[in-house]
Amino acid sequence: MRFGLIIVGDELLRGKRQDRHLSAVVQMLSARGLELSWAQILGDDLALLEARFRGTLAGGDVVLSTGGIGATPDDLTREAVARAAGVPLELHAEGATILREQFAERATPQRMKMVEFPRGAQLIPNPVNRVPGFSLGDHHFVPGFPTMAWPMLEWVVDTHYAQLHSDTPVAEYSYRVVAPESELVPAMKHVLENYTTVKVASLPSTERFGEVELSVRGPAAEAMAAAESLTAQLAAAGVQWELLDRTAGD
């Protein structure tokens, strides 16, 4: 099961705010032996959001989404998700109770819109001000404020996907090689075909033409064997290499 991240907000695309969610989610998942497979920043555009969520709802990924679930006219995530799922927005009874308890006479009709969720949604508790986020299947929606979003996403991953957590240590080996990328393809293919649990990546240097950072990453034991195989393949092809870094889990 893959994890994806959708970050919603015009302020990010216009440079008014800098995204902090991507690195935080990567670290949060990594601490649980999980990885982010993709991420995307989208503006406050109802048609765009609806189309994107229609696609992800039809897929099998776990989608974490931040932003756009407030009660102002530019908060469009809730409506977009409802449209994409083909269900109406409706006042969530438990969410309404929480807001009335939290805000009393300040639980205005406008504020109550924050708990109008797509039919069938489940709540995500908010430890900061109790205004909940919501889940629809394997899609999970939280506010854009990091102080709220990050603990709420941790709760989602620990509550709904604890069975996916892994204690298997992960290792990564990075090498500097002096060769065009095209000469590295056979060695990379050999590793991928023989060590299916690891990933191999090449990153050409932007400063030194003809140099590439080549890395192997995966479960520690498999990564070590794959790295040994990779360097043996490189040596056999006459490619120069040197170890840049080795990062291993405990």
Image (cartoon, grey):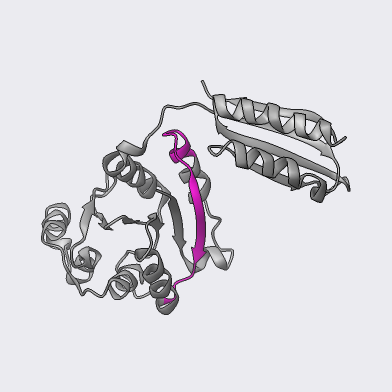
Front in this rendered view, residue 12 or 231: 231
Q: Is residue 42 covered in magenta?
A: yes
Determine whether 84 is above or below 70 in the image.
below
**How far across and how far down the image is residue 219, in percent?**
52, 30
Residue at (67% x, 30% y) in the render:
227
Determine whether 244 is above or below 148 in the image.
above
Front in this rendered view, residue 79 or 114: 79
Residue at (42% x, 27% y) in the render:
167
Q: Is residue 75 visible?
A: no
| Furthest residue in direction bottom, as rendered | 47
Determine whether 48 is above or below 38 in the image.
below
**How far across and how far down the image is residue 118, in percent?**
23, 68
Q: Which quadrant would residue 215 be assigned to in this image?
A: top right
Q: Is residue 47 covered in magenta?
A: no
Residue interval drawn in magenta: 27-45
**How far across and how far down the image is residue 177, in percent?**
82, 37
**How far across and how far down the image is residue 132, in percent?**
24, 54
- Using residue 94 as the reference point, say whether residue 211 is left or right of it: right
Q: Is residue 197 visible?
A: yes
Residue at (28% x, 71% y) in the render:
85
- Using residue 247 as the reference point, say whether residue 52 is left or right of it: left
